[in-house]
C-alpha cells in the first residue's frame, strides 16, 4: 500500500514490532470516513492482555506526527487506530510522482529476474477460437504487468504440431484437397480439412485407423508425409501469425512439439533408475503420486512418450534456456489435473525450478443463446469474432458522426480490440462466463470502450484549452469529494499493479480501471475545467486531468488496449 512505510515508522515510535509484522496487520478501512489506513489492535491485545480499545487509545496518545508528515491525524475508533492523510500533501506527492514518472508510473526497479510465460500454445490442425483469445489476453496482460514489476519477461509459445489430430487434417487434405492452395486465411483452410475429416469419419470409422497409419509414416520420417506436414503446418502458423498481429502480440521464443516429443524419455528412465517411478504389470513406466492425484503413466510400454513426458522435458528445457525464477503456464482449466501432476513430478525429481512453476488456469466462455455460432455450431472462431466486433464498432461510430474511411477503420479496430480484451480480462481468470458481444462494445458499463471514452474526454479538455498543464499549481484547492476520490484512486495505481502481478490477476487491474474511469466521469460531470473562471482552480484541475489521462493510458497498456483520440 502507498505510503505504508510512513505509517510503519509512526507506529514504530510506540511499538516494538518489526516492519513486516506491522505491514501484515495494516488494512484499508471500508469507508474513507474511517481513515485511509487502519491498524487493528486485536493481536496486540492478546500479547499484552489488555482490551484492543485501550491499546488503540494508548497508541493514539503516544504517537507524535512530525510537521512534514503526509499523515494529518491519528484517531482511535473502537479496536482500530485510524490514520488520515493530509489531502493537500497527498495530492502534491501523487500528482508530482505521476507527472515525473509518466508512462513508468507504478513501475518497479529492474529486479534481474526472469519470468517465462507460456501462451497460447495452439494445436496446428485448425484455426484459433474464442478460448484462445482469452488465453492470449491473459498471457499478454500478465506479461506486461510482470514487466512493470521489473521482471525480464520471456513470452513463449508452444506449437503442438504433431500427433493424431494433425494427421487427421493431413489425411483429409490428401484425400479430398486435390493439392489445392489455400483460397482463404491459411489456418482456416487447414481447419476446414479437420472438420471434413470428422464428418467423413462418422460415416467411415476406418478413417481413424488411416490417420494412425499416417502418424506412423510421419514418425518414420516418410518424405512425402513430412512434405505434406510441413506445408500444412506452415499454413496454420501463417494464419495464426496474422491473428497474433491483429491482437498485437508476439513471442520471444517458439517451442515446437515436433522437436520435443521424443526428448522426455531419458528423464523418465533416470527417474525409473532412481526408483521414483516403477514399471506396472504391462511394462508402462508409472508414478504413484498418492491421493488425490493417483497414479499416472509417464512412458508407455512400447517406449512411446505421452503428453506429460514432453512437459517434464520442456520445463527443464525452458529453465536451461532462460534460467527463470518463475514459469507461468496460461492454460485452460480442463488441464488442471495435468499441471498438478506435472508440478508434483518436478518437485519429486528435485528440480530447483519446480517451486517457481505456476498454472494460470482459465475457465470457459459461453455465448448468449443463439448468437454467433460458427460453422461447427459449437466454438466461436477468433477471426470471425474480431471482424464482427469491428463491424459493430463501425456501425456505431457512423451512427454518431461523419468520419473518413481510413480513420474509421483504424478507430473501429481499436475500439473492437478494447471491447474484446477488456471483456476477456474483467472476469477472474478461473471463472467461466458468457461473452456478450453487444454488451462488450457498449460505451456504458464495465467495458473497454467506456475506459477509452474517459480517456477521450480528458484528451479533449487538454487539446481544447489554450494552456499546457504544469506542476506549478496550488495543491490545496481540491476540496470536492469527486476530486478527492479521483486523487486517491490515482494514488492507488502502483499498489493495484503490484497486487495484480503477484496474484496473477489482471482482473484486479480491470476492476480498478473501471473505478478510475467512473471517478473521472463524475468529476467531469460536476466540475468545469475549460469554463472555470478562477485561474488558480483551473490550473489545478488541468493538472489533475493530465494525471488521470496518464494513469488511464498506463492501465490500458496493461490490457494491451490502445487509446483513441476521438470516438
Ligand atoms: N496445445 C494444448 C491444447 O491446445 C495446450 C498446450 C499447453 N502447454 C503445455 N505446456 N502443456 O490443449
Image: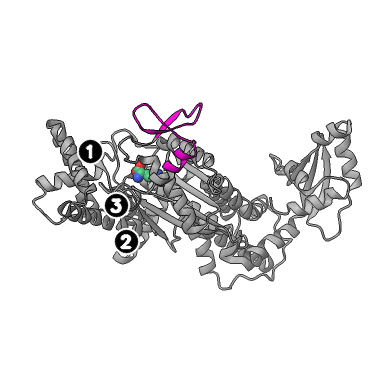
On the image, the x and y values in percent for residue 355 come to 56, 45
Ligand 1 within 8 angstroms of badge 1 C-beta: no
Q: In which quarter of the image is residue 552?
A: bottom right
SS at circle 3: helix
- Residue, disc 3: 387
Name the colour scheme: one colour
- Local packing at callout 1 (Cα closer than 10 Å; few below 14, some 14-19, many 20+) is few
Q: Where is residue 237 in the image (x, y as percent from the top left)?
A: 28, 55
Total numbered labels placed on residues in the image: 3
Q: How far apart are marks 2 and 3 (CA)?
A: 11 Å
Mark toward the start of the polypeptide (2 vs 3): 3
Query: Magenta includes 285?
Result: yes
Comparing 83 with 107, the one in front is 107
Q: Give the number of the disc on residue 376.
A: 1
In the foreground, 253 or 463: 253
Q: Is mark 3 within 8 Å of ligand 1?
A: no
Q: Does the closest atom of ligand 1 sit within 8 Å of the Cβ of label 2? A: no
Question: Marks 3 and 2: in contact by CB < 8 Å?
Answer: no
> What is the span of residues highlighted in magenta in the rendered image?
269-297
Q: Label 2: which residue?
A: 409
Nearer to us: label 2 or label 1: 1
Amino acid at each position: 500500500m502507498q505510503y505504508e512505510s510512513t505509517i510503519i515508522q509512526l507506529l514504530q515510535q510506540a511499538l516494538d514490532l518489526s516492519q513486516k509484522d506491522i505491514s501484515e496487520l495494516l488494512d484499508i478501512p471500508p469507508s474513507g470516513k474511517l481513515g485511509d489506513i487502519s491498524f487493528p489492535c486485536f493481536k496486540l491485545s492478546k500479547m499484552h492482555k489488555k482490551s484492543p480499545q485501550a491499546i488503540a487509545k494508548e497508541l493514539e496518545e503516544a504517537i507524535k506526527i512530525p510537521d512534514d508528515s503526509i499523515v494529518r491525524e491519528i484517531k482511535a475508533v473502537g479496536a482500530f487506530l485510524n490514520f488520515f492523510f493530509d489531502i493537500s500533501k497527498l495530492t502534491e506527492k501523487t500528482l508530482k510522482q505521476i507527472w515525473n514518472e509518466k508512462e513508468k508510473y507504478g513501475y518497479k526497479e529492474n529486479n534481474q529476474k526472469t519470468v517465462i510465460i507460456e501462451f497460447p500454445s495452439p494445436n496446428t490442425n485448425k484455426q484459433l477460437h474464442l478460448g484462445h483469445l482469452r488465453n492470449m489476453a491473459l498471457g499478454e496482460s500478465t506479461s506486461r504487468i510482470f514487466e512493470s514489476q521489473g521482471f525480464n519477461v520471456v513470452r513463449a509459445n508452444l506449437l503442438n504440431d504433431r500427433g493424431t489430430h494433425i494427421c487427421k487434417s493431413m489425411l483429409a487434405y490428401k484425400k479430398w484437397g486435390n493439392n489445392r492452395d489455400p483460397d482463404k486465411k491459411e489456418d482456416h483452410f487447414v481447419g476446414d480439412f479437420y472438420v471434413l475429416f470428422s464428418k467423413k469419419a462418422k460415416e467411415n470409422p476406418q478413417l481413424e485407423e488411416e490417420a494412425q497409419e499416417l502418424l506412423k509414416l510421419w514418425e518414420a520420417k516418410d518424405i512425402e508425409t513430412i512434405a505434406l506436414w510441413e506445408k500444412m503446418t506452415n499454413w496454420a502458423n501463417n494464419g495464426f501469425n496474422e491473428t497474433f498481429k491483429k491482437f498485437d502480440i508476439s513471442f520471444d521464443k517458439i517451442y515446437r512439439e515436433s522437436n520435443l516429443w521424443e526428448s522426455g524419455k531419458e528423464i523418465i528412465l533416470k527417474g525409473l533408475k532412481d526408483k521414483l517411478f516403477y514399471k506396472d504389470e504391462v511394462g508402462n513406466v508409472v508414478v504413484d503420486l498418492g491421493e488425490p492425484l493417483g497414479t499416472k503413466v509417464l512412458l508407455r510400454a512400447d517406449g512411446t512418450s505421452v503428453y506429460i513426458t514432453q512437459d517434464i522435458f520442456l520445463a527443464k528445457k525452458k529453465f536451461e534456456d532462460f534460467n527463470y525464477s518463475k514459469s507461468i503456464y496460461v492454460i485452460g482449466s480442463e488441464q488442471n489435473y495435468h499441471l498438478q501432476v506435472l508440478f508434483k513430478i518436478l518437485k519429486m525429481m528435485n528440480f530447483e525450478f519446480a517451486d517457481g512453476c505456476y498454472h494460470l488456469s482459465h475457465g470457459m466462455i459461453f455465448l448468449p443463446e443463439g448468437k454467433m455460432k460458427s460453422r461447427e455450431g459449437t466454438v466461436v472462431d477468433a477471426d470471425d469474432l474480431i471482424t464482427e466486433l469491428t463491424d459493430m464498432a463501425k456501425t456505431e461510430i457512423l451512427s454518431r458522426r461523419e468520419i473518413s474511411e481510413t480513420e474509421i477503420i483504424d478507430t473501429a479496430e481499436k475500439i473492437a480490440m478494447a471491447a474484446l480484451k477488456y471483456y476477456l480480462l474483467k472476469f477472474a481468470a478461473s471463472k467461466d462466463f458468457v461473452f456478450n458481444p453487444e454488451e462488450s462494445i457498449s460505451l456504458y458499463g464495465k467495458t473497454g470502450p467506456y475506459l477509452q471514452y474517459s480517456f477521450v474526454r480528458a484528451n479533449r479538455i487538454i487539446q481544447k484549452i489554450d494552456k499546457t498543464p504544469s506542476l506549478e499549481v496550488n495543491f490545496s484547492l481540491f476540496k470536492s469529494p469527486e476530486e478527492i476520490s479521483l486523487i486517491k484512486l490515482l494514488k492507488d495505481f502502483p499498489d493495484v499493479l503490484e497486487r495484480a502481478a503477484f496474484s496473477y490477476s489482471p482482473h484486479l487491474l480491470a476492476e480498478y480501471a473501471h473505478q478510475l474511469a467512473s471517478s473521472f466521469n463524475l468529476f467531469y460531470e460536476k466540475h468545469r475545467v475549460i469554463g472555470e473562471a478562477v485561474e488558480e482552480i483551473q490550473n489545478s484541475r488541468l493538472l489533475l486531468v493530465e494525471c488521470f489521462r496518464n494513469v488511464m493510458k498506463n492501465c490500458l497498456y496493461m490490457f494491451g488496449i490502445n487509446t483513441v483520440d476521438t470516438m
